[in-house]
Image: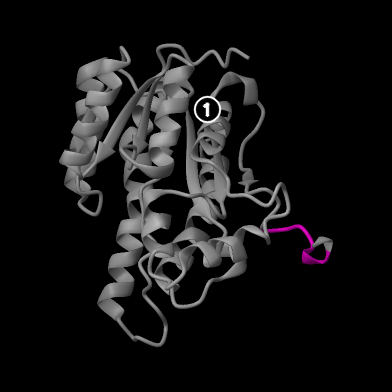
Amino acid sequence: MDLQLENKVIIVTGGSKGIGLGIVESLLREKAIPVIVTRNKNSVLEVLETFKTQGHDVFYALAELTDPVQCKKATEAVVSKYGRIDGLVNNAGVNDGISLESGDYDGFIFSLKRNLVHYYLMAHFALPELKKNKGAIVNIGSKTADTGQGGTSGYAASNGGRNALTREWAVELLPYSIRVNALIVAECYTPLYETWISTFPNKEEKLAEITKHIPLEKRMTTAEEIGDTVAFLLSSKSSHTTGQLLYVDGGYTHLDRAIE
């Protein structure tokens, strides 16, 4: 299916690895122009070198997303390069384990800044261009907002906020025909997930324990599956879809555990 994304300029925060990289790769397959916004220069340069060998010239902007000034400069760099922004994928974040019991106020506030506040900042600074082009926003979220996880209050609160902002912006931006949706992730194997699973003495057993509870095919969701769905949500093929929370998780979040 041609999603009609050719030459559409799409910002992807955290697009140099994991889910973000999967999204960038899906956009490239659709001949879009993804722009990676990241603070990790070494990671993005390595990815860009790989893309170059594949014939893709991908642009990037360095930004510490907890800094409003850097968020603004990142969007300005994209407009300076391409003269437009057609879509925004808010993806960057980290499950940082800021718990209620820790009482870490500063850590909690910082968690909100690096997991939620930059979603607002990037959307705000991209908005003038999105208005011109009737663009689209996709916010990447996590099941933690629905299920909880334990020991990660900052991340869970941020994901609840991402869901709420998705519907708030969908309403606010109706006059401009800007669609806003969220894609909710449950169990997707990424480098960050690999780091977490490696903290267990027998990571293979732990992984098997998790995947057996994923209803569809007893396997992890792939970054490619998430990327392809994001591409669809950005495209005109989903032209009457807005304010939706779409769970790409093999049924993990909502299907009855009794089916096991």
Q: Is residue 133 above or below residue 67?
A: above
Q: Secondary structure at mark 1?
A: helix
Q: Is residue 220 above or below residue 46?
A: below
Callout 1, which amino acid?
Ala
Is residue 83 shown to the viewer in this render? Answer: no
How far across and how far down the image is residue 94, in percent? 36, 58
> What residue is rendered at 79% in x and 62% in y?
260
From the viewer's perspective, is 184 left or right of 130?
Answer: right
Residue at the far right in the pictured view = 259
Quadrant in which residue 148 is drawn: bottom right
> What residue is rendered at 32% in x and 16% in y?
54
Q: Nearer the viewer, residue 96 or 154?
A: 96
Residue at which label 1 appears: 231
Let me know if residue 16 is in the magenta part.
no
Q: Which residues are magenta?
A: 253-258
From the viewer's perspective, is 91 left or right of 207?
Answer: left
Assign the N terminus to one quadrant of the image.
top right
